[in-house]
Amino acid sequence: MDKSWKIALFSCLLISLFASAYAQTCASYTFSSNRLYSKCNDLPYLNSYLHWNYHPTNGTVDIAFRHTNVDTSTWVAWALNLNGTGMAGSQALVALHNTSGLPHAYTSSVSGYGTTLAESTLSFSVPSLSVEYVSSDMLIYATLVLPSNRTSLNQVWQAGPVSGGTPGQHPSGNNLLSTGTVDFLSGNTSSNSGGVASQMRKRNTHGILNAISWGILLPVGAIIARYLKTFKSADPAWFYLHVTCQSAAYIVGVAGWATGLKLGSDSVGIQYNTHRNIGITLFCLGTLQVFALLLRPKKDHKYRLYWNIYHWGVGYAVIILSIMNIFKGFDILNPGKSWKRAYIGIIIALGSIACILEAFTWFVVLSRKKKNGSDPKYPHVSNGENGVNGYGGTRSQQVV
Ligand code: HEM
Ligand SMILES: *[C@@H]1O[C@H](CO)[C@@H](O)[C@H](O)[C@H]1NC(C)=O
Ligand SMILES: *[C@@H]1O[C@H](CO)[C@@H](O)[C@H](O)[C@H]1NC(C)=O
Ligand SMILES: *[C@@H]1O[C@H](CO)[C@@H](O)[C@H](O)[C@H]1NC(C)=O
Ligand SMILES: *[C@@H]1O[C@H](CO)[C@@H](O)[C@H](O)[C@H]1NC(C)=O
Ligand SMILES: *[C@@H]1O[C@H](CO)[C@@H](O)[C@H](O)[C@H]1NC(C)=O
């Protein structure tokens, strides 16, 4: 008996939990001043709700946009994007506490990502607009004359910081996911998880592919070439390891580069020129490096020295540019701090390993020099049957 009560109570609790998770919280909200709206929707991000009445006779809609838990130094906005999706081109209703400390609403046509949300007229008419700030909720009320009687439209909503009375840029994260569609007639809404979320996924894929290939595999391959080569016993293994590592880096890197080109062509209005140009340079230099491997002169050819200098120079340039571009990418993508820290950690680790190996190599080379004195085999060094001298150091560092 006792047990069944507990089970019943527990099920009730579970059911009400699920019910409350699925129920629209907007439906139970009562507006002050007796405003009534026949339809509403819980927007999927940023604690926001949209309520409305649509009038088919004259193609107008009365809306109420509510953003909960905002302080007085936060702006909120809701917008329709008539000709596209996302922020650029959207027609926004903005609310904030102005310099008089009063809640204030106005319209702003958002031309692009560099907007400061200055007041401007929208591409459709807004016969009424007002604002209310109640128990930390910011409420925007408006009547919109929907252009050409359209009812199914793209919507975006947002919140960001106000400083000195002007709106500042909103953060990323969920603030880049707050887009979707609304059908004022049917009440159908959709969150644009397909659009922006997949864009985020693409950006992350781009970042991970490039960080692993250009940012990690490439320097590891260079370290292998420079330091393993010192040891006779590692010949020709170092050469195959080096080629495998750099080929893998190149293949993954080109895939990452291609995702970057796609992202670039998809992004409207915003351009990351430095990141893009370094990326293209890296692709060219990397490709050159692969072809150079096929054209390398035999080890005792008189041009081999020049080839070595070229291969060495381009190799290090690629590594330095790659690391620079990955940090540029971090600034754009703005992933959690831990990602940036992890990459910095890896770079520091690789750098330390290179330093230790460098010191060790010099130690070995110098002690051999001392021991062998005028050994005819030294400093001339065999590079193994491949006759390859890759990224590696100068001949005097190589040890038989
Ligand atoms: C102070 C004014 C604003 C600035 C400086 C600003 C800046 C930006 C920037 C730079 C991005 C691209 C970030 C990225 O892709 O990494 C972005 C995205 C976005 N913004 Fe804004 N924004 C402002 C106002 C608004 C307003 C008023 C809304 C909506 C009413 C909005 C909604 C969005 C949305 C949904 C995205 C992600 C989707 C997209 O890229 O279009 N923003 N914003
Ligand atoms: C549109 O029609 C509704 C009801 O049909 C009316 O209440 C409203 O005032 C009208 N709006 C405009 C701008 O004509
Ligand atoms: C959307 O496109 C229509 C037709 O091309 C144009 O008249 C209107 O101004 C555009 N609206 C915005 C906000 O760009
Ligand atoms: C602040 O907003 C209120 C309400 O819209 C308005 O009456 C007042 O003039 C505004 N003050 C400033 C400094 O813009
Ligand atoms: C919108 O629909 C109403 C009612 O059907 C009609 O009277 C009006 O002319 C239409 N407006 C536009 C711009 O098509
Ligand atoms: C609302 O959306 C659903 C699914 O997208 C669709 O099946 C339904 O027909 C839509 N309702 C109206 C009235 O457009």
Image: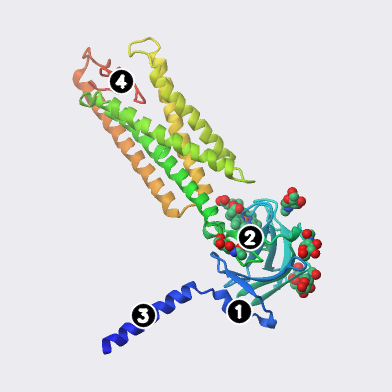
Q: Earlier in the sequence, mark 4 or mark 2?
A: 2
Q: Earlier in the sequence, mark 4 or mark 1?
A: 1
| Disc 3 + disc 2, Cβ < 8 Å | no
Q: Position of residue 326 (x, y in %)?
A: 47, 42
Density class for disc 2 (Cα within 10 Å; few <14, some 14-19, many ≥20) is: many
| Disc 2 + disc 1, Cβ < 8 Å | no
> Alpha carbon of mark 1 to alpha carbon of mark 3: how far?
34 Å
Residue underneath mark 1: 135
Q: Name the residue: 51% across, 43% down.
A: 328
Horizontal relation, residue 326 to residue 382: left or right: right
Instruction: State whether residue 163 is above or below residue 361.
Output: below
User: Could you say which is closer to the camera, residue 85 or residue 176?
Assistant: 85
Point out the quarter of the image occupied by ligand 5: bottom right
Residue underneath mark 4: 396
Q: Quadrant of the N terminus?
A: bottom left
Q: Earlier in the sequence, mark 3 or mark 2?
A: 3
> Alpha carbon of mark 3 to alpha carbon of mark 2: how far?
38 Å
Residue underneath mark 3: 11
Mark 2 vs mark 1: give the one in front.
2
Q: Earlier in the sequence, mark 3 or mark 4?
A: 3
Horizontal relation, residue 188 to residue 302: left or right: right
User: Could you say which is closer to the camera, residue 119 or residue 369?
Assistant: 119
Q: Position of residue 110 (x, y in %)?
A: 69, 55
> Alpha carbon of mark 4 to alpha carbon of mark 2: how far?
67 Å
